[in-house]
Image (cartoon, rainbow, N blue to C red):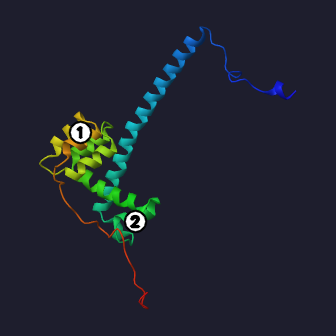
């Protein structure tokens, strides 16, 4: 009796006229559609992230932190969006770069440049090389772009807005 309730591996599949070749063709078409859908949503995510970072940049420029009683935009963002500290600081840094470099912003916003590539370019970008770096990123993938930029001097070496690690000393010296 128990064996009569067991299902066979293909017992739930419908038989498709045309046999296994037709089934493989349908699966291949379905896979292609899913890949197209994935790419579409990935490009759209760039648009939405660019818009979010642009809004954050505007709030940063308006000094949202002091208006809301915070010490920095990143600490306000961390609390407001429930973000990890590192993510909040990264978003503020990136938003400032995108507000400064509008060609980079528009290219990222269009969906053709991934977030990781945009972040990489910000390390090396200044007003004189923005167009050149964006053009390079449109020609090369991320790994190739890393190689092209290897040995280049970063645009600016900045200290973080707040220390990455802090220590508090107790009054009893411990």
Name the residue nearer the viewer: 81 or 32: 32
- Name the N-terminal-most of marks 1 and 2: 2
**In this orientation, which residue lies closer to the viewer: 26 or 5?**
5
Task: Judge the density around disc 2: few (<14), some (14-19), many (≥20) Cα neighbours within 10 Å.
Answer: many
Q: Identify the mark at residue 93; answer none if there is no mark.
A: none
Residue under label 2: 76
- The image position of residue 152, as x and y in percent, is 16, 49
- Asked whether the residues under the numbered discs 1 and 2 touch, taking CB atoms below 8 Å apart as contact, a structural biologist would say no
Q: Is residue 167 left or right of residue 13?
A: left
Q: Residue furthest front?
A: 3
Q: Is residue 135 above or below residue 26?
A: below
Callout 1 environment at 10 Å: few (<14), some (14 to 19), or many (20+)? many
Q: Nearer the viewer, mark 1 or mark 2?
A: 1
The residue at the far bottom in this view is 172
The x, y position of residue 141, in whole percent, is 28, 36
143 relative to 19 in the view: left or right: left
Label 1: which secondary element = helix
Against 90, residue 67 (above or below) is: below
Quarter of the image with the N terminus in it = top right
Q: Does residue 139 appear to the left or right of 78 in the view shown?
A: left
Which residue is at 57% across, 15% downward?
23
Please tell me the numbered disc located at residue 137: 1
Residue at x-position 33% and y-position 46%: 50
Image coordinates of residue 78 in percent, x first then y, are 42, 63
70 w.r.t. 102: above or below: below
Q: Is residue 110 above or below residue 159?
A: above
Q: Is residue 49 left or right of residue 96?
A: right
- Percent coordinates x, y for residue 133 in the rendering: 18, 43
User: Which of the pair 51/26 is nearer the observer?
Assistant: 26
Furthest residue in direction right, as rendered: 1
Q: Residue at x 44, y 91 (%)?
A: 172
Cα–Cα span, label 1 and label 2: 32 Å
């Amino acid at each position: 009796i128990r064996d009569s309730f067991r299902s066979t591996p293909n017992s739930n599949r419908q038989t498709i006229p045309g046999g296994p070749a037709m089934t493989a063709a349908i699966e291949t078409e379905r896979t292609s559609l899913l890949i197209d859908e994935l790419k579409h949503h990935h490009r759209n995510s760039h648009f939405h992230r660019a818009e979010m970072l642009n809004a954050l940049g505007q709030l940063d420029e308006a000094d949202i932190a002091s208006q809301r009683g915070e010490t920095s935009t990143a600490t306000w963002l961390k609390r407001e969006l429930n973000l990890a500290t590192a993510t909040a600081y990264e978003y503020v840094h990136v938003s400032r770069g995108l507000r400064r470099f509008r060609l980079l912003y528009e290219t990222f916003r269009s969906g053709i440049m991934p977030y990781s590539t945009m972040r990489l370019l910000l390390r090396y970008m200044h007003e004189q090389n923005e167009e050149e770096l964006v053009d390079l990123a449109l020609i090369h993938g991320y790994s190739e772009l890393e190689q092209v930029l290897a040995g280049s001097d970063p645009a600016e070496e900045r200290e973080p807005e707040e220390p990455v690690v802090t220590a508090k000393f107790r009054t009893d010296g411990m």
